[in-house]
Image (spheres, helix red, strand yellow):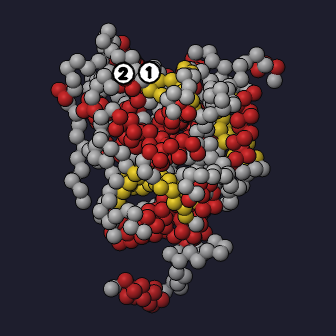
Amino acid sequence: MAAFSLLPSAHIAPKPTLHFIKASTSDLPKTSPSLPSTKPQPPSLKPHHNIREEARLHNAATVTTNHPRFSAKYVPFTSITDPSSSDESYSLDEIVYRSQSGSLLDVQHDMSALKHFDGAYWRNLFDSRVGKTTWPFGSGVWSKKEWVLPEIDDDDIISAFEGNSNLFWAERYGKDFLGMNDLWVKHCGISHTGSFKDLGMTVLVSQVNRLRKMNKPVVGVGCASTGDTSAALSAYCAAAGIPSLVFLPANRISMAQLVQPIANGAFVLSIDTDFDGCMQLIREVTAELPIYLANSLNSLRLEGQKTAAIEILQQFDWEVPDWVIVPGGNLGNIYAFYKGFSMCKDLGLVDKIPRLVCAQAANANPLYLYFKSGWEDFQPVKAKTTFASAIQIGDPVSTDRAVYALKNSNGIVEEATEEELMDAMAQADSTGMFTCPHTGVALTALNKLRRSGVIGPTDRTVVVSTAHGLKFTQSKIGYHSKNIKDMACRLANTPVQVTADFGSVMDVLKKYLLSKSH
């Protein structure tokens, strides 16, 4: 311990047909700065060159004196809600997680510099980078680098070219079960480690990589997790060669989620507590040891996550949907989506933002109860076990962020019981999806808002699917085998046992086909 004693502690206190238009360089302002080129580079004559080297050489050759200085800094979140409340700020190169008063921090960009270019410029620039292998713009996150971490060197970035996730038309589910013709699912679960957490972790680990090169006191990176955060952290740290430490609540996550940090070489502690207990411990540990905190208390994560909102707008050819529904646990993601949409509006890429819905499991629903009280009385809850394990959080870190996002988007909070979310997941799967329980929570919220008439039949609605269904196969097996206590599992599709002879098989098949013939 003495070896660490001199290190400073961190502060802990059907609408139009969709198109995807690629920009040409002629669309860009003639006076634009020399932002990183998206033009594919010819193969290097030197076989030892890789895409990092090509980017380094190209950037060195295109530096000009009229390049605007895009920058960002940490500010207290309270100064976002009330700009006159504080002039406190920190460099992103400082290791700090809370303000002097103990409030959350937020990454604030120099909007005046970004406004030097109009919305058409940013739309064209972002669109022109999609589908490229040019480093680092092949990533859906880093294709928006100027809005994420503008000052990081490309060579410090750790990326698996995450993001650019599928936005698909849930045609049959929308039409057959909801009477909707414009329902879409943003499948963030097809990202590198199978959840949206990759979007934030590439940013955080890249910044840690930068800090270590600057000889800042960072030995490793740690997180408390209910599964997906630990998978993303361990993968990106492994890619960077940085030690990762994971605090998991014992016996509360799926084996598919547990095996990911183990396989990627993380130092895993299985602790006899819930997520909130793990979160308290990791905060105490990172205050004493040179371990960088990777939970969404760290606002760097949200800078990556907000790019999913920008992607949605890109995928709709910059048309704004009416609704976006996001599962909510620790509540950073709902704010990240708001921040992405809001930046696009403030910088002239779009003229409005969608209404946001935060969907919570009824077994871990403090934000829902707060919303139902008219935002009058927030009380943490003791989270009960839920199949939506990643949002089994009773005392969310980002409550204030979520409330700000919902109030400014005319947003709504809904909840889903265990039976509702599992039925919704099974119903969606029956139309060709393979969803996670958290998506089941969001689909339940959609069902309730659709039945009440709040969401109309022609409203363009996006449900954010946060993780891949393959991480939650055990819950699906339990449901379809009708082996979940006190749950009817009314949509279970149980295998039919049949003897191995032609007549028995024909009898079963005829009965099945007759039931489907109508």
* Amino acid type at image mark 1: Ser
Locate residue 15 relative to residue 398 in the image: left or right.
left
The residue sitting at 57% across, 42% down in the picture is 400
Query: What's the CA distance linking mark 2 and mark 1?
Result: 8 Å
Q: In the rendered image of this protein, does residue 387 appear above or below residue 494?
A: above
Badge 2 or badge 1: first in the primary sequence: 1
Amino acid type assigned to the residue bearing label 2 in the image: Ala
Q: Quadrant of residue 428?
A: bottom left
Which residue, as the protein is rendered here, is positioned at the far right? 2
Q: Secondary structure at mark 2?
A: helix
Residue 209 visible in the picture: no
Q: Quadrant of the N terminus?
A: top right
Q: Is residue 217 left or right of residue 86?
A: right
- Residue 212 visible in the picture: yes
Residue 99 on image: x %, y %:
62, 28
Dot label at residue 113 = 2
Q: Is residue 44 above or below residue 330?
A: above
- Residue 71: assigned label: 1
In the picture as drawn, the residue positioned furthest to the left comes out as 26
Q: Measuring 63% from the left and 51% from the top, which residue is drawn there? A: 378
- Please tell me whether residue 152 is drawn above or below residue 180 in the rendered image: above
Q: Are marks 2 and 1 in contact (CB under 8 Å)?
A: yes
Label 2 neighbour load within 10 Å: few <14, some 14-19, many 20+: few
Q: Up-down: is 59 above or below 342? A: above
Query: Quick one: SS at disc 1?
Result: loop
Q: Quadrant of the C terminus?
A: bottom left
Where is residue 496? Give x, y as percent. 52, 81
- Which label was assigned to residue 51? none
Label 2 vs label 1, nearer the camera: 2
